[in-house]
Image (spheres, helix red, strand yellow):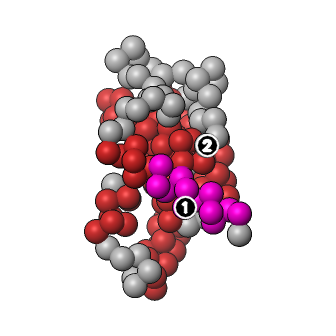
Amino acid sequence: MTASFGQKFDLRSQSAEILYLKTKAIEGIKTALADDALCTADQTIAAVAQMAAYEVLFGDSRIGRIHMQGLKRIIQLRGGLSNLGLAGSLEEFILWIDCNISYILGEPTFLDETQFPTSSPHIRRPDPNLDEFGYNRYCLALQRRRVNRRERR
């Protein structure tokens, strides 16, 4: 989703608007994390995962890694992937983001299968080493090169 947004809109020309929206998203996440009822809610988990993906794709991959560490902790507090809501959809979304971030950064997944087993046999962990993404894999490879160049600076 974020990648298609980036392709559709020139992010550099909208940097003030993007920064404003990013700030609002972070404020919303901070508010949710401070609330006992919302800190491990599905929407908070999804928002943190999306922020991690955004940072890796368009921002600072170091910040993306920090978001992924926070996501791991929230999922642990929630009781694991099997306790996420939306009938398994959130779990698949989280695993998809983890796989893509892993592929882009050229690193192992953050949600290790031994610590974060999936909830049911129909949920398959994507393998970042297989060509399962089609055209998206090409886009991810381009993004991986961009991230690597940014990190070398």
User: What residue do we see at 39% from left, 14% from top?
Assistant: 121
Q: Earlier in the sequence, mark 2 or mark 1?
A: 2
Q: Position of residue 54 (x, y in %)?
A: 48, 60
Task: Name the kind of residue labelled 2 in the image.
Answer: Gly
Q: Quadrant of the C terminus?
A: bottom right
15 in relation to 94, above or below: below
Q: Position of residue 80 (x, y in %)?
A: 55, 29
Q: Quadrant of the N terminus?
A: bottom left
Mark 1 packing: few (<14 Cα in 10 Å), some, or many (20+)?
Answer: some
User: What residue do we see at 49% from left, 78% from top?
Assistant: 19
Give the magenta-colored segment's residue range.
Answer: 141-152
User: What residue do we see at 35% from left, 46% from top?
Assistant: 136
Q: Position of residue 57 (x, y in %)?
A: 50, 59
Distance from Cα at disc 2 to Cα at disc 1: 12 Å
Instruction: Say whether residue 120 is left or right of residue 102.
Output: left
Q: Which mark is residue 94?
A: none
Where, by quadrant of the figure, is residue 148 drawn? Answer: bottom right
Element assignment for label 2? loop
Residue identifier under label 1: 146
Residue identifier under label 2: 106
Task: Name the kind of residue labelled 1 in the image.
Answer: Arg
Q: Position of residue 60 (x, y in %)?
A: 61, 64
